[in-house]
Amino acid sequence: MKSKPGVFQRSLFGGESVPGQGTLFDGLTPVTDPGARRLPEQQETTGCKPDLGQELSRDLEAKAPAGDRFAGIDDLALLRQLVLKCRQCSLRQGARGVVFGEGNPEAEIMFVGEGPGKTEDEMGRPFVGRAGQLLDLMLKSHGFSREETFIANIVKCRPPGNRLPSPDEVQACLPNLMAQIRIIRPKIIVALGALASQTLINPGLRVTRDRGKWFEKDGISYLVTFHPAAVLRDERNKRRLIWEDFLSLKQKHAELCR
Ligand code: URA
């Protein structure tokens, strides 16, 4: 298998045990910040997204690249039905099913990981293994709920043995994710790890060098951070750094959306 230059060779899928690791949340101190949580009655009025209307539907259609198989689709439930039937690459053959992603169809923040791991493949949901538990904790600790965000992956089917998806598999699956982004129209996308950062923002990105940086593209603010599975391995103080990145996310979200 040929790999894309610069993409980390080690797969970052969750669901694997981490030898020599303490508890999942070692080194993480959850903070409670009630002020950062929106009250239910605020949720409809304080969002920063304009109403989806006719104007936008035309816009979405216009932005889908020529020949895009999802051009004109502006409903996430419909997209889901189509993506669940996807057979654009061979990953589907080795997986139990397609892990479409989940969350708020009007999310202001979207998280994008690499691809489903074993637990995700079994449950049909993204980030529900150990890496997902860490993501949930980071969200909660910074005043967000998982449900208010949308969580997806670069590839929607688990690669055999949790290997890194090949460039061909990424390209085959990308229209699925791009359609999700077009429909959800998040203000912020958090790229979790190298594959998401290099695929969505710039192939030259290095997570160790560029984590914590923000990039603007097509009206969306992108944040590069570590993949939670890499944080669980905690090489070089990643726990403290991802914590800082979530603080930055909280600040940016407050600037853009509150
Ligand atoms: N790792 C990922 O990249 N995505 C998941 O959904 C789970 C683990």
Image (cartoon, rainbow, N blue to C red):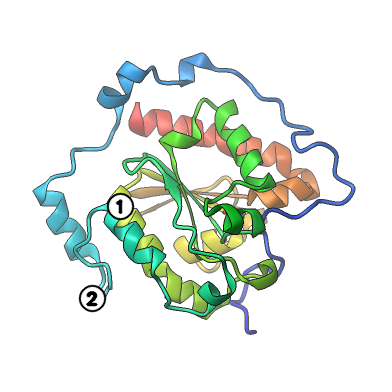
Circle 1 residues within 10 Å: few <14, some 14–19, many ≥20: few
Tell me which corner region of the image, top left, top right, bottom left or bottom right, holds residue 3. bottom right
| Residue projecting furthest to the bottom | 1
Image quarter hosting the N terminus = bottom right
Q: Which quadrant, please, contains the C terminus?
A: top left
Amino acid bearing label 1:
Ala
Q: Earlier in the sequence, mark 2 or mark 1?
A: 2
Task: Identify whether 153 is placed above or below 133.
Answer: below
Q: Position of residue 239 (x, y in %)?
A: 72, 40
- Report how many numbered discs are placed on residues in the image: 2
Question: What residue lies at 78% left-to-right and 46% top-to-bottom?
Answer: 234
Q: Is residue 218 visible?
A: no
Q: Are marks 2 and 1 in contact (CB under 8 Å)?
A: no
Image quadrant, ligand 1: bottom right
Residue that badge 2 annotates = 66
Q: Residue at x 44, y 47 (%)?
A: 102
Disc 2 CB within 8 Å of nearest ligand 1 atom: no
Q: Residues within 10 Å of mark 2 (few under 14, many from 20)?
A: few
Mark 1 residue element: helix
Mark 1 highlights which residue? 77
Q: Is residue 202 above or below residue 181?
A: below
Q: CA distance from mark 2 to mark 1?
A: 23 Å
